[in-house]
Image (cartoon, rainbow, N blue to C red):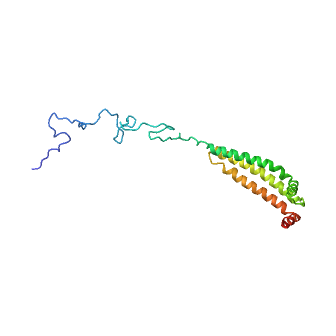
Amino acid sequence: MVDERPKPKYGELAPEGWSWQPPAPPPGSDSSQGPTSSDGGADSRHAQPGPHAPPPVPSGSRDPYGATSAPAGAPRPIRAVDLSVTSLLLFFGLLFSASMIPALFDFNTVLIQAATAQGYTAFAPSAAANTMGIVAGVVTIVLQLVSIVVSVRRLSRRKLAFPVPILVGVVTFALWVGAITFAFFNDPSFVQQITAR
């Protein structure tokens, strides 16, 4: 014999007077916490640091371990030693260049005086020697300007700057020696005197 009665639906088989209650929270849980987020954890806006959490460290202050952190985006300080050495080198470079440039623009006269002081009796001035002196003088001025501009820019960008005037000084000195050598050896009679000695 087939049971033609309809199948029971939700709650139809529960005892009379029974109603569903939500389960009680487990022991030890804190029911006073704030609303939870969608992932089941406590809302981070109401979360409190635990008893062992370290206090927040402000930017630019000393942390509990003694390290100092610089504020975000703060420029690096200028190196005092680099600034002092660079300024000193630039000063001496300008001083020596200022004393040498007039001699380069009157090169023949200076070379005659130098040759006489060394005991050589003959040195013939030439247009080539004079042109070489003028070129050396102009290049010296340009090199000194480049040295100042590049050094100041590197100092403002907190980069090492003292090698710049050193390099420019070496190049400038090599230029002077080359100009004097060219002028002296451009005179055959002067070369003959040197070889005779």
Of 172 and 33, which appears nearest the observer?
172
Q: Residue at x 66, y 49 (%)?
A: 162
Q: In the picture provided, is 163 more to the left or to the right than 184? A: left
Q: Residue at x 88, y 57 (%)?
A: 116
Q: Residue at x 76, y 50 (%)?
A: 142
- In the picture, the quarter occupied by the C terminus is bottom right
Q: Position of residue 179 (x, y in %)?
A: 81, 58
Q: In the picture provided, is 9 more to the left or to the right than 48? A: left
Residue 178, above or below 8: below
The total number of labels drawn is 0
- The residue sitting at the left extreme is 1
Q: Quadrant of residue 122?
A: bottom right
- The residue sitting at the top extreme is 32
Q: Position of residue 185 (x, y in %)?
A: 84, 63
Q: In the picture provided, is 128 more to the left or to the right than 93? A: right
Of 179 and 158, which appears nearest the observer?
179
Residue 19, above or below 169: above
Q: Position of residue 55 (x, y in %)?
A: 42, 36
Q: Quadrant of residue 26?
A: top left
Of 40 and 51, which appears nearest the observer?
51
Q: Residue at x 65, y 47 (%)?
A: 154
Q: Position of residue 166 (x, y in %)?
A: 69, 52
